[in-house]
Amino acid sequence: MDIQKQNEEKLREACCYGDNEAVLALLSRGISVNSQHEINGWTGLHWACKRGQADTVRLLLGHSADPEVENNLGQQPYQLTNDTNILSLLGLDEPSEGEDGADSSDTLPITPNYIVNPPMEYKVSTSSTTTSSGMHVPNGVPESNGHTKMLGLVNQSTHNSHSTPCSQSSLPANVIHQSSHPLPHPVSTHDNVARHSKELVVKVRMADSEDPDFIEVDIQRSHLNYSHLLTTCCRELALNPQMVERIRKLPNTRLRNDRDTQRLSEYTELEFVMKGHSRPAAKAMELPF
C-alpha cells in the first residue's frame, strides 16, 4: 500500500474515532476528504455518521465533504445514523420513513476488529515511521540522543558483561569456565503470552489484490478449525466464503482441513485465493531443436 492510500485509510479511521486533530492534519496534507475504501466504498463521512461523531461531521462538511457519496451498498452517510444533530448538519430534520438509520449497516460484509473491540481512548498516528535522520525504526522509538530505544527484551549477557563488579581472577575456576560459554537465548515473553492466549492472531489478505497489505485477525483457539477460520477471515476481508478456492499459508502451503488449521502459529501469513483469480500456469519453454 502506497503512502497516499495509507493516509486515506488513516483519515477514515480518524473520522471513525472522532480524532479531529488527526483529521485536520491529514486534510492539510492534501488527502481527499471524499476518498473511498476500495472494498466497501465508505468515506470518512460515512464513518463519522455511523459512529455518531457530530463534531467530525461538521468538520468534514466544512472541508467540502460530499454528503451524497454512496458506498458499495448504495448508502449515503445520512442513512447510517439516527442522530438528530448529525441529520440536521446534513440538512435533514429526521430519518426518512422506511430507513433503518444506523441499523442499516448490519448488512455490511466487513466489521473491522477495532470497531468490534474499540479502545477506551484512541488517537490516530499521523507521524512517519522514520526518524529525522532517515533511519527506519520498526520496533522502537527514537530517543533525544539519536539512539534507538527498542521495545523488546534486553540482551542479558551483554548487560551483565558491562555491570559485573568483580574481575574473573576473583572467581572460582569452575565459574570462569562456565562463563566462557555463550548464555542460552532468553525465552521471548511474547512467545509465553501467545502460548497461553485464548486467541490466535493470523495475518490475512486476498491473493493477487491491488492492496498487498495484510490485516491481523483474532481467531478463538476454542473454535480453531478450518470452517471457523474461513468464515472469520472472509468477514474481515469482506469476501464471500463460497468464492474462496483455497487458503494458502505463505509461501506455498495449502490449508486443507482442521488439522492443518490447528498447526497454525502466531502471525502466520495467509492468502485467500478466489475462484477465477488463480494465476495461469506458466507455459512450457520452447527449446530449439
Image: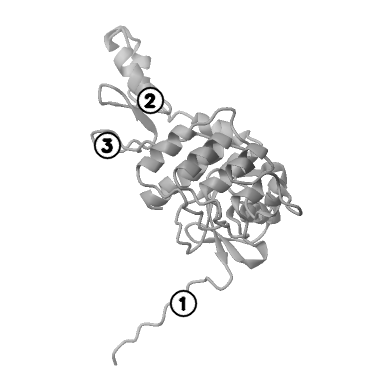
Determine the secondary structure under disc 2: loop
Disc 2 versus disc 1: nearer the observer: 1
Residue 171: % across, % down: 33, 9
Report the amino acid beneath label 2.
Asn
Q: Which residue is mark 2?
A: 155
Q: Residue furthest right?
A: 98
Q: Which residue is mark 3?
A: 135
Using residue 63 as the reference point, say whether residue 102 is left or right of it: right
Tell me which numbered mark, 2 or 1, is placed earlier along the sequence: 2
Within 10 Å of disc 1 (Cα), the crowding (few <14, some 14-19, many 20+) is: few
Report the amino acid beneath label 3.
Met
Using residue 121 as the reference point, say whether residue 22 is left or right of it: left
Residue positioned 49% across, 61% down in the render:
252
Q: In whole angstroms, how far apart are the C-alphas of marks 3 and 2? A: 22 Å
Residue positioned 69% across, 54% down in the render:
107
Between 27 and 234, which is closer to the camera in this rendering?
27
Residue 240: % across, % down: 64, 62
Q: Quadrant of residue 116?
A: top right
Determine the secondary structure under disc 3: loop
Count the numbered circles shown. Answer: 3
Q: Which residue is mark 1?
A: 281
